[in-house]
Image (tube, helix red, strand yellow):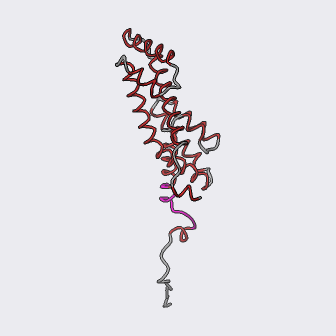
């Protein structure tokens, strides 16, 4: 009777990828789900962000199409298709998408703060007759006549239960002014001692 001896390398940990000649089926499935989730995060972004994102054109079209689909099953199938497209990407392309999503998450807090500030200013302009004077003192570059017209029309829309066209335009005008002021404030900020040394 033959005496078999198995040699086991004690110091070498078991690697299923090496043993099976590649990633296990479970690992491939986990990777596939992770890429599909990443695609889902893209779908949740605004159209403007998707247009600027560092992604291939076929993926961009698929993401924009998924945003338009309202049917639950159709939306789910489109997400699966996005996952399939994501699996075709190179590792560096996937990494670029991850970095872009991370940077957007950082911006989303400041975007939310901006949204609340603009909504608050709009509410003040619509509720308080003296608020426009304070607003114009804060934003001297604003077109006072246009703002008066928008405020008057927005109030009329609310009173007559009409579509909020002027209400939305007023928001856009305020947002543009606030954003412009934030940009000019940040660009004219004094240099820190470290920056002055350089």
Q: Which of 132/87 is in front?
A: 132
Residue found 60% across the figure and 39% down from its top? 52
- Left or right, 152 with reference to 20: left
Whole-percent x, y for residue 100 in the image:
54, 47
Q: Which of 80/152 is in front?
A: 152
Outermost residue, left direction? Answer: 127
Name above or below for residue 169 compared with residue 45: above
Name above or below for residue 126 compared with residue 71: above
Q: Which of 17/3 is in front?
A: 17
Image quarter of the C terminus: bottom right
Whole-percent x, y for residue 143 in the image:
52, 20
Whole-percent x, y for residue 81 in the image:
55, 41
Q: Main secondary structure of the magenta part?
A: helix
Whole-percent x, y for residue 144 in the image:
49, 18
Residue range of the region highlighted in magenta in the rendering? 21-30
Name above or below for residue 13 compared with residue 53: below
Q: In the image, is residue 27 part of the stretch drawn in magenta?
A: yes
């Amino acid at each position: 009777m033959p005496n078999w001896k198995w040699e086991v390398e004690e110091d070498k940990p078991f690697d299923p990828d090496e043993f099976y000649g590649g990633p296990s089926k479970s690992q491939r499935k986990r990777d596939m789900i992770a890429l599909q989730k990443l695609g889902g995060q893209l779908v949740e972004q605004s159209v403007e962000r998707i247009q600027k994102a560092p992604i291939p054109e076929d993926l961009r079209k698929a993401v924009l199409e998924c945003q338009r689909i309202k049917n639950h099953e159709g939306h789910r199938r489109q997400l699966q298709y996005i996952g399939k497209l994501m699996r075709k990407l190179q590792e560096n392309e996937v990494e670029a998408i991850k970095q872009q999503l991370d940077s957007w998450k950082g911006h989303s807090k400041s975007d939310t703060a901006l949204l609340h500030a603009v909504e608050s200013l709009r509410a003040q302009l619509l509720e308080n007759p003296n608020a426009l004077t304070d607003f114009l003192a804060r934003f001297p570059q604003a077109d006072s006549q246009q703002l008066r017209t928008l405020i008057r029309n927005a109030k009329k829309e609310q009173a007559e239960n009409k579509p909020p066209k002027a209400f939305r335009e007023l928001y856009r005008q305020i947002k543009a002014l606030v954003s412009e002021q934030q940009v000019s404030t940040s660009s004219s900020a004094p240099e820190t001692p470290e920056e002055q040394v350089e």
